[in-house]
Image (cartoon, coloured by chain):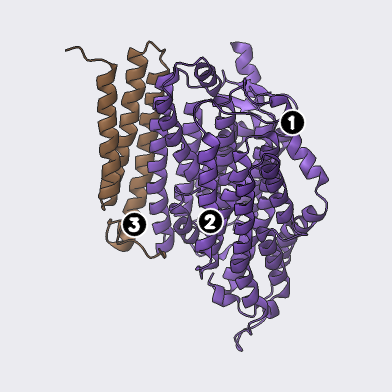
Chain colours: A brown, B purple
Amino acid sequence: MQVSLIHYLILSAILFSLGIYGVITRRNAIMVLMGIELILNSANINFIAFARYAGMQLDGQAIAVFVIILAAAEAAIALAIVLNIYHRFNTVNVDEISRLKE
Amino acid sequence: MLEQIIHSVNLLKPETTLAITFCVLLVVDLIVKKRGSETAWLALIGLAITGFFLMQEPAAGTNSIFFNMFAVDAFSIFFKFIILASTVMIVLFSLQSNELKTKRRALGEYYALLISLTLGMFLMTGASNLLMMYLSLELTSISSYILAGYTKDADDSSEASLKYVIYGAVSSGLMLYGISILYGLTGAIDIYGINKTLMMGDVNMVAVVIAGILIVAGFGYKISAAPFHFWTPDVYEGAPITITALLSVASKAAGFAMMIRFFKVSFLDPTVGNLSFGSWALFRGFEWNQILAMISVLTMTLGNLVAIWQDNLKRLLAYSSIAHAGYMLLGVVVLSNEGVAAVLIYFVVYFFMNLGAFYTVMLVANKTGSEDIKEYKGLGYRSPLVSVALTVFLLSLTGVPPTAGFVGKLYIFAALINAKWFWLAIAGALNSVVSLYYYVRVLRNMFLRPADPSAQPISFSVPQIVILLILVIPTILLGLYFGPLVEYAQASISMFGVH
């Protein structure tokens, strides 16, 4: 069987759904951040697959490189914030951290 | 190619200045160990130079620079002025804030991050390429995540930044996925190319709609429109009040600029509508303005109804700013130059009244250490000047004539009625009435309730009063004399690629 564009798109859609599922169901801040990484990487797969199979120029690959760098920057900031939260609240469970009124 | 780059670099001077200021501030913060406000003044100098270059930009012409990455046109310059003015005011506020001074760390990074936030917002106003939009949105977001948690010794502030980073990252992830689909469908990443491909037809409409809705999630989060507003109350309440004020004005302005440009340029259908008469139509097959109308009604109703129950004034203003995003979206819904001009007018007005309201809350919190509405009992007797100023801001936020807020709402509703969106105009007017209730609750506490017998009169320093007057006087003046503002806004709606 030939691997074609549609297979990549299905893969990325599955990854995207898993990411959303993780963000919604997980209560641990680290796991939520991992869900976000899945969402970003599913978009990356889309970009590269479109660039490779749909006969487009290198735009897609270039975007993917930017997104990878940005994901790293965002993860660094997010983990620093989670670390600070852990120091203050002794937990990283997002449900337990609700001093601000609902 | 070389000419294009030289041309582009020339038009990018304000952004370049901001980037240099950012680096200078970081280095100065490393070298100077003294705890002073040098970095704040350096930031102000950088912002002043940025303002100087911004005035040099050719306001009349429209330019697309760096191969359609970025547009320098009257529309983006207008928003850049609002963002720049907000940042200048926020630096001035920060100099007065006790909340920031109680920190053990120096404030060098704080001002550096403010500048990088401003740079991100500048780039958002002109971004005309989906990658550029995403990157500038992230630059803005990442800077504001850190700033929201800047007083990291406080639990509230830490919690605010955690909630902000989670909601922000999810929304921008959704937006990126939407961008990837739109890229696959059209093969272009600049909004002009996308428009061209969409107009040629044979694009799967369902996929375009899904991509569009995912991209709207990113914009909706930035302007805090329902249903992407969940972060707003918590972040606004927990973040340092200076940052809350900046997020509620400048970052919303940048989000609106990017959203209007995206919809107007990439989904424009030049064959329908009458561009020379100022109305335009979006790409056939899907009613984008119906979706936006639903979002705006939901946003303002939710913001206003929940604000009624709030006892913390910062949180109340957070819900009020959600409601105001709803009013401003009404101007986008009508898809006409008149509507966009109304949004621009509204932003100038909103700049004065909202920053003013947050500034008075900060001044009072400096003295009383609380933002609770109960603390405002009898404030009218303890500090008449600040109470009267807050009254003006709150009445202006409601839209009572003769304040500036009335002018803002007037133009929005006029645009709606001219475009025959009567039900939306009625919904907006009803919402304004609801908002009167919770604003007046604050006024009642200030003037009709007696103060605690032990409470002393509160006095403020001269610079604090000067800054307050800078915000109060335009709030009243713009309500009485708004001709030049309206003309300037109407001249500022031209965008590159749309005539």
Q: Give residue B442's quadrant in the image.
A: bottom right
Q: Is residue B271 visible?
A: yes
- Location of residue A70 (image quadrant): top left
Secondary structure beneath label 2: helix
Residue B56: mark: 1
Whether residue B96 can be seen here: no
The subunit letter for the residue under badge 2 reads B
Which quadrant does the C terminus of chain A fall into? bottom left
Q: Closest to the observer: B131 or A23?
A: A23
Q: Which residue is mark 2?
A: B301
Q: Position of residue B463 (x, y in %)?
A: 72, 62
**Is B148 positioned to the left or the right of B13 in the image?**
left
Q: Earlier in the sequence, mark 2 or mark 1?
A: 1
Q: Does residue B468 lie above or below B424 as drawn?
A: below
Which residue is pictured at 36% across the width and 23% down the height?
Answer: A47
Return the chain for callout 1. Answer: B
Residue matched to label 3: A85
In this rendered view, identify the residue nearer to me: B361 or B95: B361
- Tags 2 and 1 touching, CB below 8 Å: no
Foreground: disc 3 or disc 2: 2
**Tag 1, which secondary structure?**
helix
List x then y, in percent, for residue B471: 72, 57
Residue A72 vs residue B49, the one in the foreground: A72
| Outermost bottom residue | B453
The verdict on a common chain for dots 2 and 1 is yes
Q: Amino acid at mark 2?
A: Thr
To which chain does the residue with label 3 belong? A
Density class for disc 2 (Cα within 10 Å; few <14, some 14-19, many ≥20) is: many
